[in-house]
């Protein structure tokens, strides 16, 4: 693995405190609040650690971001074993800091079994990710504007198909496509791959809700924060192989934005569906 990816894997390797209780930490970064994908990924790790049937894998999760996380303090994860059925296992996780719940997640696990198989067609004629600039190359013209964040190590190799949000400022559109993968090789652990994709799924999706308005995520006067996050896992995938994240803005109203995303393997298999709603407050022009 690359060093940033190794750090991410370590970040997801929670400390066991007691039965059904785990502790996670945040990286030493200059952040105002904990990255939402981190607490979602760590919560899924905590839930997965309590699933005794190792043949069962997560097939859906639903989560709410309740309070901003403190990046300087540990996060305690408490797992409630809601159900262990013959076919499905259900877990609820709450993340706690300073005596308050900052996040909750409910996840369902299911063993693969035969059944009907169909999916919506994958996008066609997408540029090969190897031909697209990586994040630092794409954002190099804006590095002064980004400051230290431009030089920050990134465990996820993220490549915009349609140009970055900064490049598309002032251009209205309804969606975007992003290639992503873990920046290095991962062990053959489906749980780890699911948790890393959960982490990565929060990286660009809410930005999509700004595109119909011709706004970018660094726009002055725009306040954004994730409110809830839902994922459905359909087919096997590897987080260290290229995945196409096809994103579309669904609605913006009442200071909230809703976006949907479909994550495809490079050969066009629909692996994951994501829907996220977030807070979007735009300060009126003076």
Image (cartoon, rainbow, N blue to C red):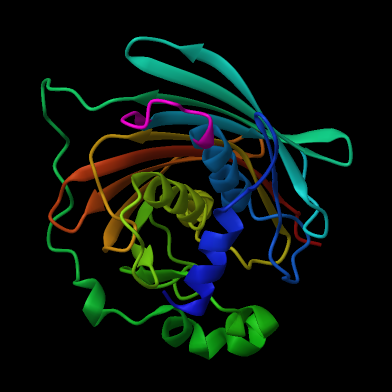
The verdict on residue 51 being magenta is: yes
Q: Is residue 285 left or right of residue 249?
A: right
- Which of 21 and 101 lies nearest the eye of the viewer? 21
Residue in view at x 34 percent, y 46 percent: 190
Magenta region, residue range = 49-57
Dominant secondary structure, magenta: loop
Farthest-out residue, right: 98
Q: x, y percentage for residue 115?
A: 12, 20
The verdict on residue 274 being magenta is: no
Q: Is residue 47 left or right of residue 168?
A: right
Q: x, y percentage for residue 195?
A: 46, 47
Vertically, is 214 above or below 52? below
Q: x, y percentage for residue 283?
A: 76, 54
Question: Which quadrant of the figure contains the C terminus?
Answer: bottom right
Residue in view at x 24 percent, y 50 percent: 264
Vertically, is 60 above or below 258? above
Vertically, is 153 above or below 238? below
Quadrant location of residue 127? bottom left
Q: Is residue 135 left or right of residue 18?
A: left
Query: Residue 215: in sight, yes or no?
Result: no
Query: Residue 262: in sight, yes or no?
Result: yes
Quadrant location of residue 11? bottom right
- Which of 15 and 47 lies nearest the eye of the viewer? 15
Q: Is residue 177 left or right of residue 145?
A: left
Quadrant location of residue 92? top right
């Amino acid at each position: 693995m690359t060093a940033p990816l190794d750090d991410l894997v370590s970040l997801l390797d929670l400390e066991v405190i007691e039965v059904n209780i785990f502790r996670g930490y945040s990286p030493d970064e200059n952040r105002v609040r904990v990255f939402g994908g981190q607490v979602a990924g760590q919560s899924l790790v905590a839930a997965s650690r309590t699933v005794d049937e190792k043949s069962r894998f997560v097939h859906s999760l639903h989560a709410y971001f309740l309070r901003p996380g403190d990046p300087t303090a540990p996060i305690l994860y408490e797992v409630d074993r809601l159900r262990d059925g013959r076919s499905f296992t259900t877990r609820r996780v709450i993340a706690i800091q300073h005596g308050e719940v900052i996040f909750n997640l409910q996840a369902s696990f299911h063993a693969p079994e035969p059944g009907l198989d169909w999916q919506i067609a994958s996008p066609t004629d997408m540029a090969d990710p190897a031909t697209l600039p990586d994040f630092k190359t794409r954002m190099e013209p804006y590095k002064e504007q980004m400051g230290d964040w431009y030089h920050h190590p990134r465990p996820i190799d993220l490549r915009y198909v349609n140009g970055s949000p900064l490049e598309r400022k002032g251009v209205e559109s309804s969606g975007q496509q992003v290639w992503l993968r873990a920046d290095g090789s991962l062990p053959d652990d489906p749980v780890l791959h699911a948790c890393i994709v959960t982490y990565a799924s929060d990286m660009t999706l809410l930005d999509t809700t700004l595109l119909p308005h011709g706004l970018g995520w660094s726009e002055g006067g725009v306040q954004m924060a994730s409110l809830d996050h839902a994922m459905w896992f359909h087919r096997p995938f590897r987080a260290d192989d290229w995945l196409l994240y096809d994103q579309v803005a669904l609605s913006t109203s009442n200071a909230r934005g809703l976006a949907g995303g479909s994550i495809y393997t490079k050969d066009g298999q629909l692996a994951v569906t994501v829907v996220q709603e977030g807070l979007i407050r735009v300060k009126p022009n003076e």
